[in-house]
Amino acid sequence: EQIKKGNYEHFMQKEIHEQPESLTTTMRGRLICGGSSKAKSVLLGGLKDHLKTIRRSRRIVFIGCGTSYNAALAARPFLEELSGVPVTMEIASDLLDRQGPIYREDTTVFVSQSGETADTLLALQYALENGALCVGITNTVGSAIARNTHCGVHINAGCEIGVASTKAYTSQIVVMTMLALAVGADTISSQARRVAVIDGLFDLPNKVREVLKLNEELKDLAKLLVQEESLLMFGRGYNYATALEGALKVKEVALMHSEGILAGEMKHGPLALVDETLPIIVIATHDSCFSKQQSVIQQLHARKGRLIVMCTKGDAPLVCPSGSCRVIEVPHVEDCLQPVVNIIPLQLLAYHLTVLRGYNVDQPRNLAKSVTTQ
Ligand code: G6P
């Protein structure tokens, strides 16, 4: 086992640090870069015969559990933007509990690292019975979800051993971003945007390498937070998913209560929790929600909130003019790719908190890597 971990102490640590490579593998052979910008495109072999059907569907429905659900949530805005098709989200167990409507004209997309999660698999059977087109996005060739869907994409992130999913999450977001590029019509109006995102994908492993250099900084932050009972994370837009996923990491491995909060909902409850003691991470990287997040920060400040702000490199004076909050500066990438970069400091924070608190990093109590029973 130690050999497999290489120079790392834990699989989770190894899997966090190998993300530049796992993302490269995920994209290998799938980004086509001809001479002119027009020739830049995405090729997903497993989907090519179904793209027309997906484009014409009434809805695209993402279905998954845990981290896989969060990855789909992160990819949703860009898929909606490029496809123009409404994209709805379903937690697999909740869809089953409600027996929610699924139509023949729907494209259902099943996202699962293992490809074996019981609820996701049952939701797949349900969608098949209802006649929807079923697409699988998994990390496991030959898994039940890969076998039973009509078509799909393997994320090729490599074997993930830590129970808390890290590298699979970022590869899933990249696959769903490529899915959006493949499904979205190649209209003149969207061309510049498409090229910018494809260029951003090419450069993403470098940006991830850069953000991983924050490791020591996050270790220091973990030392500061190690005794806390609770940690909130505020995000919105592309990074609402980052807040949910960051909080999930902290809760599942560091066994610390943590909650991801949609910043737009702040005044509808969460604001009541804010005081001088409760630490709050606010994700405020540069995108179309930035000025709204700046105002959230001001309002949290006014209530003496204990803030840690994640912002784009160079933006510290804009998010924290008084210099009184702690800042995590991350490299800037295209807005739809920013969740890939932004989750990494939170993965590192969860990892270091777990080590400092003395808990089992790779096998958190009561949890399993693959939940094959309901
Ligand atoms: C379990 C794992 C999580 C994972 C979830 C969904 O809860 O501990 O890391 O996100 O299952 O698993 P899947 O294999 O379907 O992505």
Image (cartoon, rainbow, N blue to C red):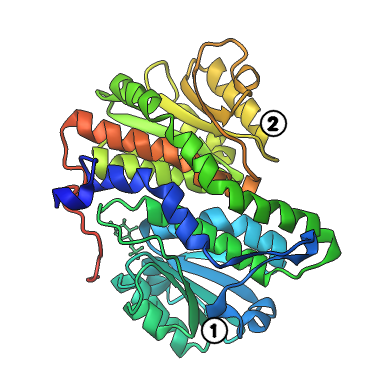
The residue under the point 69% across, 31% down is 291
Which quarter is ligand 1 in? bottom left
Whether residue 263 appears in this view of the structure is yes
Spot the residue most to the right: 188
Residue at mark 2 to residue at mark 1: CA–CA distance: 39 Å
Residue pointed to by mark 2: 291
- Classify mark 2: helix, strand or loop: helix
Q: Position of residue 350 (x, y in %)?
A: 32, 37
Ligand 1 lies under 8 Å from the Cβ of mark 1: no
Query: Is the residue under label 1 in contact with that under label 2 (CB below 8 Å)?
Result: no
Residue pointed to by mark 1: 133
Q: From the viewer's side, name the closer residue of 152 and 263.
A: 152
Query: Does residue 305 appear to the left or right of 181 in the view shown?
Result: left
- Classify mark 1: helix, strand or loop: strand
The residue under the point 49% across, 15% down is 304
* Vertical comparison of 50 with 313: above or below: below
Q: From the viewer's side, name the closer residue of 287 and 202.
A: 202
The residue under the point 47% across, 22% down is 307
Q: Would you call the spot at circle 2 few (<14 residues within 10 Å), some (14-19), or many (20 or more)?
A: some
